[in-house]
Image (spheres, grey):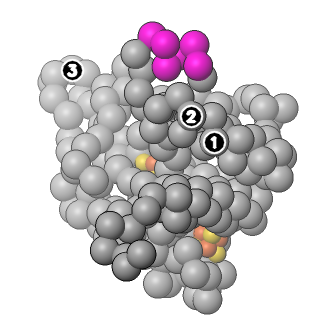
Amino acid sequence: MWYLAGLGIDILHFEPFAPFGRGSGFPESEVNPDDYVRGFAEALDVAAECGVSVTEFGLFHLQMPRNQQCFAHYASRFVVNPDGRLTFCLGAQDDNTQPGNMLGVGTPDIDMGTVHFEVDKVRRLQTGFNVEKIEWCNSCSAKHLCCGICPAHNILRTGDAGSPDSRLCSIRKGILREALLQMWKHSAAVEDPMRET
Ligand code: SF4
Ligand code: SF4
């Protein structure tokens, strides 16, 4: 990380391996949740020392809690695959498996040179993955930060977009704990100018 900071890079995004899209076919790349959380906590400390910001999907909602699971609709974006198919999902792009199909929002007509864009499906997907509907997450304190992980990932792991992957659930809880602890440590170290001496 020091090397990257020396090159002028000031933000690094970390992510546990995802078994779909570009990750399809590499099951050996799975991480152990405890190892990932431990490594992430170390990365936070090193990043603070060398002035680099660290991001992770599990932390994206820290400043803006919400209840929608999927990140794709942040900017109403979608992915154009090389074969012309459009998908709502940034991760399951170039993927003809169940998540790729579930999140597909457009098909090309090569002969006509056009794309059929499924506007109604996009609208459904933009609101369809609500953490309030997930029983597993009901009493979780990180509910509006994690939002029940990711529909594509959950489908591959559990067969259901609304049933979170327990392995990623423990990673999410772990990295949120570490990030909040680090924020607290740093703010506690800054002297409060309003405090009477
Ligand atoms: S389904 Fe998951 S990977 Fe795909 S865009 Fe939504 S949050 Fe990202
Ligand atoms: S950390 Fe686990 S229980 Fe909490 S919102 Fe995420 S998936 Fe649900």
User: Are discs 2 and 3 less than 8 Å apart at CB?
Assistant: no
Q: Is residue 138 above or below residue 109?
A: below
Q: Secondary structure at mark 1?
A: helix
Give the residue number, with chain letter if any, for mark 2: 49
Q: Residue at x 61, y 89 (%)?
A: 139
User: Are discs 1 and 2 less than 8 Å apart at CB?
Assistant: yes
**Residue 4 is one of the magenta-drawn residues:** yes
| Disc 1 from disc 2: Cα separation | 6 Å
Q: Residue at x 43, y 62 (%)?
A: 191
- Which stretch did the figure color magenta? 2-7
**Residue 159 is one of the magenta-drawn residues:** no
- Evaluate whether residue 182 shows in this view: yes
The disc label shown at residue 150, or none: none
Within 8 Å of ligand 2, the CB of disc 1? no
Instruction: Check disc 1 and give the amino acid type.
Output: Asp
Q: Is residue 58 above or below residue 131?
A: above
Q: Nearer the viewer, mark 2 or mark 3?
A: 2
Left or right of 150 on screen, residue 193: left
Give the residue number, with chain letter if any, for mark 1: 45
Q: Residue 107 occupies which quadrant of the picture?
A: top left
Instruction: Check disc 2 and give the amino acid type.
Output: Glu
Give the residue number, with chain letter if any, for mark 3: 111
Task: Please tell me which of labels 2 and 3 falls first in the chain.
Answer: 2
Q: Residue at x 58, y 19 (%)?
A: 2
Q: Residue at x 29, y 54 (%)?
A: 73
Give whichever of 97, 63 is nearer the camera.
63
Q: Nearer the viewer, mark 3 or mark 1?
A: 1
